[in-house]
Amino acid sequence: MKQLKSSRRNFLKNTVIASTGALLLPDFLKAQKRANPSERVNLACVGIGNRGGEIIEEFSKTGLANIVALCDVDMGAPQTLKVMSQFPDAKRFQDFRQMFDKMGNEIDAVCIGTPDFSHFPITMTALSLGKHVYVEKPMGRTFNEVELMMKAASKHSNVVTQMGNQGHSEANYFQFKAWVDAGIIKDVTKIVAHMNSARRWHGWDTHIKTFPPAEKVPSTLDWDIWQMQTFGHNYNHDFVNGQWRCWYDFGMGALGDWGAHLLDTSHQFLDLGLPYEVKPVKLTGHNDFFYPTSTTLSFKFPKRESKPAVEVMWYDGVDNLPPIPEGYGVQGLDPNIPPPSTGKIEAPKLNPGKIIYSKELTFKGGSHGSTLSIIPEEKAKDMASRLPQVPASTSNHFKNFLLACKGQEQTRSPFSIAGPLSQVFCLGVIAQWTGDTIKFDREKKTITNNKKANELLIGPPPRKGWEEYYKV
């Protein structure tokens, strides 16, 4: 695709890029400000419609945040107008760069509820200015974006980060950790994660050979800013309001959407790290533009010290159920799973969840904050007296972030933990996109058997005017 010819406004009007790539900023922007324990956190919100609006509401409920700024590329859409009416005193912006330029000294933290591909430039800007960052999952669209986000967070060590897999502050997090510490979950050799609900792109013609035709841009939408650093696309309604998730260029499909809710605790507490192989087992409706209607992926992780090698199997698609072990029982609709911004979860044949196989025990679990159970039921009853007491959560994911901004807690899904998890999904997407098995060097962080796939770790170069975000 051709890059857009239109020029972009400078990142910050008074910002100078040094030869090293570092940002030379006014002193008041360099300060890494932490709110005092007695103060509320001044929170700027970028992406305020749909899921972004839900995030803002959750932060507001904590009573720990002042919503000082609202920013969205479409400030006249019904979903954004609703949020603006709830916070009439918050200043409003259509360009996140202008927001930081004009309000840099009034912002403590930023929440980012934009599409997957646009997490990166907003996050990198916030980190460079010493602002705490809460960003929805997955962290970024490409492996390299996530790598740079982790490096920036490490460089600005006083900045608090949190990825928005909200179940990582609920019961499953504390139970999984307690069961690992007590030796209940040990010697895991296989994990099956499945998300078999219908997706937005199911039913689309899988023989599409081009992007959808150009349509008239809504008068309230800044389409140029919407695209951020990506190559130019003509506006089409099937790119916005959640539809971006369907396209390789913009979103991360079902894997990026649900993987962080299903595999987060397994990845962290089993020390999985990055896989050495990702193999596409099934790709129904594979094409070059949007995600398959059904996907089965195999991720292979090596032995880690005393922990055995693990294979993680991923299943999505309404007709692509995983094998169910004997004694699994019935999995009802889990109340811990919040409905999507588009409405209710359609009841699938099998609700989103995971099955964890160890050498001695088998566990089943749902998504988000859902707790695990041992199967079959007879085995669970036999183990009941040996299960450790699980502590209750001291704070939900949103309160945890704000308390961390105030120096009172540590975030449970900081970039150091959420980054490698997000990179696992980035590798899975590359296997989906190319249709090829990829061999990954965990130390050098390169794909060794496929040049095209290796190039996708970085992705296409950014549009002119957006290069500075790729410098740490």
Image (cartoon, helix red, strand yellow):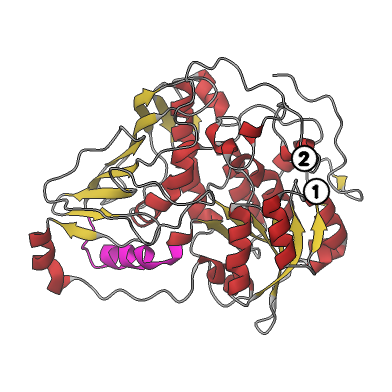
On the image, the x and y values in percent for residue 118 come to 66, 43
As measured in the structure, the alpha-carbon distance from the residue carrying label 1 to the one carrying label 2 is 7 Å
Q: Is residue 282 left or right of residue 442?
A: left
* Circle 1: element type: loop
Mark 2: few/some/many CA within 10 Å (<14, 14-19, 20+): some
On the image, the x and y values in percent for residue 11 come to 83, 45
Q: Which mark is residue 225?
A: 2
Q: Nearer the viewer, residue 279 or 319?
A: 319
On the image, the x and y values in percent for residue 402 come to 60, 71
Q: Residue at 37% of width from left, 30% of height from top?
A: 294
Region of the chain picked out in magenta, as a range: 168-186
Is 170 included in the stretch rendered in magenta? yes
Name above or below for residue 34 compared with residue 258.
Answer: below
Q: How many marks?
A: 2
State whether residue 443 appears in this view: no
Q: Outermost residue toward the bottom?
A: 38
Q: Residue at 48% of width from left, 74% of height from top?
A: 395
Amino acid marked by disc 2: Ile
Please name the residue that numbered disc 1 is placed on.
95
